Structures are given as structure tokens and as C-alpha cells.
Amino acid sequence: MADSVPQTAEVGVIGMAVMGSNLARNMAHKGFRVAIYNRTASRTDEVIAEHGTEGTFLPFHDLADFVASLERPRHIVMMVKTGRGTDAVIKEITPLLQPGDVLVDGGNVYSGDTRRREEALRPAGIHHVGTGISGGEVGALEGPSIMPGGSKASYEAICPVLERISAQVDGESCCAWMGTDGSGHFVKIVHNGIEYADMQFIGEAHAVLRAAGLTNAEAADVFESWNHGDLDSYLVEITSRVLRAKDPRDPATDLLDVIRDEAGMKGTGTWTVQTALEFGVDVSTIGEAVFTRSVSSATPVRKASQQALKGPDRTISVDDRRAFIDDVRDALWSAKIVAYTQGLDEIRNAAAEYN
């Protein structure tokens, strides 16, 4: 690929995995000229081959050429593996940047690492914006919720890009400055911790409905009805869709019944609980959801326990199914309120630390 391109880019994206490539496409759809770069060059080529006609992309195989293509002050969004991968990119790109340039880290990052990186880049006059991005791969493409941190000047430098690509609700951008330092990533950490609890509640609600004799299809109808009231949410919506899905290898079998009951973690839920302990904040509901994921992954321990101990009867006798379903709905709503309250209280307690 010839890396010398006469046209300049308005924004650049480093990291062409699903989230990075979809954010770049989102930017291009909104009319930005987007430079893209990936350490493995073939991935950059794949993005151009598959989506190059969707907008103005400037693809690069060389990081220096990628940086040189950007208008000053440069706006660069990193979507790379958290931890050493992020540090490696920052180390490589920093000598190529100039005062006033903006480096956005859009990964799920421990906020303490964000504070360290922001402090290291500050003397060079480089704006480091630790930014939480919520919505998954679909949100990245169609409009995510965006939680930038860093200095107010840093946010003002990058907000024209972030606000335009974010989700829009009632004419308002779902992007707002969270505060200085690692605030953006901290809010995203707690956001994910609340989501862990939310998913645990939904799983427990489904288990109780099944114990009462509902099939997965009947439970799907229940979740779909809940999604039209004050439980309306993406997680409730997709739960109803998952419950209806069939195993492609056997259309008579529900997909849910053949999925392994093991859930992994990427760190944000753990960080939510660890930070709460440091602040002395009660996030016990979120903590139980995190620990339950750990239990789900400990398959040998669970199997041994099942052999040693007889669990409770898995069926529930229900006289009034409609009233029972309403009770489960109220329990789910109440549990969600508790988790949100705990998460927001943690953010409130952290505000003094980060600002």
C-alpha cells in the first residue's frame, strides 16, 4: 500500500478490531475524513476492502505516516488492548505528537492507569482523554454513549468529534465531560459493574420463571412485555430474543439450553468492587454479581459440590401465575434500583478524589 496520501484526515483511529473499525466507520458516516492504522497491517486492508466505500478513509501501514496525515491539532482515538498494549502504543506515538494534540483512549481501562498516563503526557502538552464508550459493537457503529475524562480543555478539543458520533436522544448528544483525570474511565468501570448486577438479576428472574414451569418461549413473552414498561432496556430486550433463539444444529432445541453456564470477566466489575472497598462504599449487590461470575467459571468446584450436596427442589408451585410473574417483575425492578443506587453512590464518593 502506498502510504503517501495528499488529502489530510480530520481524525485518526488506531486499532481495527471490531470496536475500533466500527468507530472509524461511524466517523466516516458522519462526514469525517478518517485515518486508520492497525499494528497488523492486514487488518487495515480488510477494513478498507469491506467498508472503504462507506466514507473517506485514509489507510496507513506506518504509524509515522498515519500521524503526519492528520490536521493539527491532531485528534487520535486509540482502541487497542488495555494494559501493556496501550502503553506500547503511547510510547511509540508520543515522539510523533506535538503540543495541543489529543490522544483519546477509548478502551475499558483501570482509571488509575489513565491517571498515570495523563500525568506522563501532560508535560509534553499532549491532551490525554480517558474515555468510556458504551454500546458494544453496534453502538460503536450507530452511536454509543461516551464518557470522556481529562482536563476541560482536553474535552473541548475533542468534543466536536465525540458529540457528533455519539447516540442522540431527544436532540441531545449522549456524550458529556465526566471530570478531570481518570473520571471518564472510572464512570465506565462503575457503569459496567452495574451492568454485571443487571445481568445477574435478569438471569435469576429467568431461573425463577423456569422453576415456576414457564418454557423459554413463555419467559421470552414475559421479558418482551416487561420491555414496554419501566423495565425497558437493551438487556431486557435482548433477553427476550435470546430466549426465543434455537440451536442452529437442532431447531427443536433452545439455544440457551446448550450454552455453557460459564461467564468470564474483563476486569471492570472487579475494579468496581476493589475501588468501592478503598472508598468504604457498599456495593454488595454488584459484588455478589462479580463473585457469581467467578463461581460460574469454577466448573470443577461446582461439579464436586453438586456431588457432595443435594440442592433445593428446582420447581416452584404457583397457584396464580400472573400474580407470580408480577412479583418477579417487581423484584427485578427493585434489585435494579439497589444496584444503580450503589453504583451512583460510588461515583459520588469518587468525585472528590478525581476532581
Image (cartoon, grey):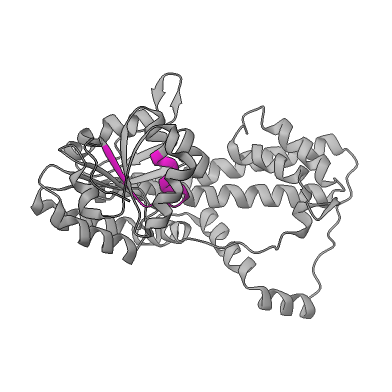
352 lies left or right of 100: right
Above-or-below relation of 299 to 8: below
Above-or-below relation of 12 to 91: above
Split into 4 quadrants, where in the image is the C terminus?
top left
Q: Position of residue 263 (x, y in %)?
A: 61, 61
Point 34% across, 59% down: residue: 39
Residue 128 in view of the camera: no
Q: Position of residue 92 (x, y in %)?
A: 21, 61
Instruction: Looking at the picture, tell me which residue is in the foreground, 207 or 73.
Output: 73
Q: Position of residue 311 (x, y in %)?
A: 79, 69
Instruction: Looking at the picture, tell me which residue is in the foreground, 140 or 59.
Output: 59
167 lies left or right of 96: right
Q: Which residues are magenta?
A: 11-24
Instruction: Looking at the picture, tell me which residue is in the foreground, 354 or 337.
Output: 354
Q: Position of residue 206 (x, y in %)?
A: 74, 48
Furthest toward the top, the residue is 171
122 lies left or right of 288: left
Point 21% across, 40% down: residue: 70
Q: Is residue 298 magenta?
A: no
Above-or-below relation of 222 to 182: above
200 lies left or right of 9: right
Residue 226 in view of the camera: yes
Instruction: Looking at the picture, tell me which residue is in the foreground, 223 or 6.
Output: 6
Point 26% across, 44% down: residue: 76
Furthest toward the front, the residue is 2
Above-or-below relation of 156 to 298: above
Tally of marks:
0
